[in-house]
Amino acid sequence: MAATETRQQIIDAADGLFYAQGFAQTSFADIAAAVKISRGNFYYHFKTKDEILDAVIDKRLSDRRKLLAKWDETADGARNRIECFIRIVIVNQAKIMAYGCPVGTLTTELAKIDHPSGDRANEIMALFGDWLEQQFLELGCGENSRDNALHVLGWSQGVSTLAQAFKDPAYVEREVSKILTWLDGIVAATDQKRSQ
Amino acid sequence: MAATETRQQIIDAADGLFYAQGFAQTSFADIAAAVKISRGNFYYHFKTKDEILDAVIDKRLSDRRKLLAKWDETADGARNRIECFIRIVIVNQAKIMAYGCPVGTLTTELAKIDHPSGDRANEIMALFGDWLEQQFLELGCGENSRDNALHVLGWSQGVSTLAQAFKDPAYVEREVSKILTWLDGIVAATDQKRSQ
DNA sequence: CGAGAATTAGGACAATCGTCCAAATTCGTC
DNA sequence: GACGAATTTGGACGATTGTCCTAATTCTCG
């Protein structure tokens, strides 16, 4: 099999296992079993566990960039694009209730063990923050755009944490309604300001 | 030394280490070094690592109950008590930026590894949720009280997660201002409804 | 087909993990 | 001071960890 192919399978399996079990709790043996490859084979593709982590972070960054690009293309207008982001807590509800937010739980875990790749993991969080800021800028929020972006981002992290703790789908639905009401309030306020 | 004394020192050290490093990342050797006790001595006080975890959760539950009781005594009115809760993200800012929320990170970690004591850890989260609900009930929010309580609780989790990721104190301050404005909006709305 | 490169298999390695035990030490009580 | 209980010590244990190496296998191309 081509090296790139096996390498990709390792990354994909590690991505899923890091999400479901956490980085520190996932061993080479776990990934090997998932890919059905000998343990020693890892050393050919990745010299250390940290290299796998970096590759997984790269993949997640790439995946999220693609997701945001898709929303940029398909969703009509900045408000609807923000709603796309908001609704991922419903779309991915089952996984979030089981494993939490893939972005938030990784950044939290790496920050807590002070891992060198923690900054790279934070880039995924920053990616969403920057994208949201861009949407609010397009909405006409001006200097409040960054503020609003972090508000929505933090909201999603809070909802994910409580969804995992309480496993209550109805709570998630209510919070989505609330933040959408807040969003439309922002839209109305900027529209009003613009017409003045 | 009395057994209860050593036991308490172990629990206190484990509490701090579980918070700073995470449960899974903290070994018996780590705690032993912190308490300056031989590793084997643990077996006399705790048969397994899970027993230490349970004791730490008990301590945290007790500590938080005391904190809430103090707020019940000292703070004047339900609104100010809710503000006490909101402001812990500022009071504990340094630790939160370094290690995240003690409650949220533990529940997240235990949920992810599907640990038997995860439910007990969730009780700490539920403790705050129930207390907040009680405050909103006293504010006169009626059936919206639970909803509002989870909103504030989720908010605190989101702020903690982003504070840890971005390490930006100004963001925390802005979010506190925002949620206090929201809170006063709730107070005003219920006052208005009451006077009708 | 055959030679050389690319890829994989399987295990050795030192370290660390949670657990457990027997011996040594300290403590309280008469 | 002496005896039994309570407490502590230091290390052994099997398992697992990440890392690393060598031999075997598969693939590629002349």
Image (cartoon, coloured by chain):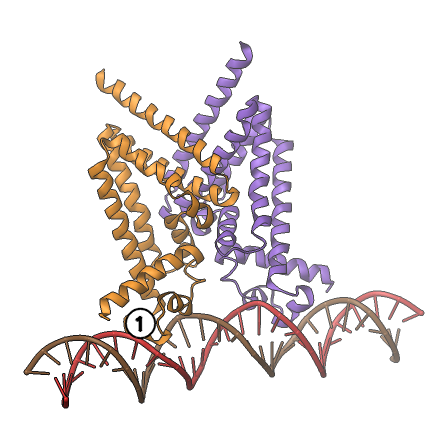
Chain colours: A orange, B purple, C red, D brown
**Residue A15 in picture, x, y percent from top left:** 35, 58
**Residue B50 in picture, x, y percent from top left:** 60, 60
Task: Tally the numbered discs.
Answer: 1
A121 or D25, nearer to the observer: D25
Residue occupying the point 24% across, 47% down: A66
Position of residue B5 in the picture relative to residue A43 (left or right):
right
Quarter of the figure with residue A20: bottom left
Quarter of the figure with residue D8: bottom right
Please say if B2 is above or below A84: below
The reply to whether residue A116 is in sight is no
A112 or A167, nearer to the observer: A167
Residue occupying the point 59% across, 44% down: B123
Quarter of the figure with residue B71: top right
Name the quadrant of the N terminus of chain B.
Answer: bottom right
Position of residue D1 in the picture relative to residue A153 (left or right):
right
Which residue is the site of mark 1? A47
Residue under mark 1: which chain is it in? A
Position of residue B140 in the picture relative to residue A21 (left or right):
right
The reply to whether residue A106 is in sight is yes
Residue occupying the point 54% across, 10% down: B195
Please say if B164 is above or below C10: above
**Residue B83 in picture, x, y percent from top left:** 52, 31
Instruction: Name the amino acid type tagged 1.
Output: Lys
Residue occupying the point 46% across, 28% down: B180
Please say if C29 is above or below B151: below
Residue occupying the far top of the picture: B196
**Residue A67 in picture, x, y percent from top left:** 26, 45
Which element type, helix, strand or loop, lies under badge 1? loop
Mark 1 nearby-residue class (10 Å; few <14, some 14–19, many ≥20): few
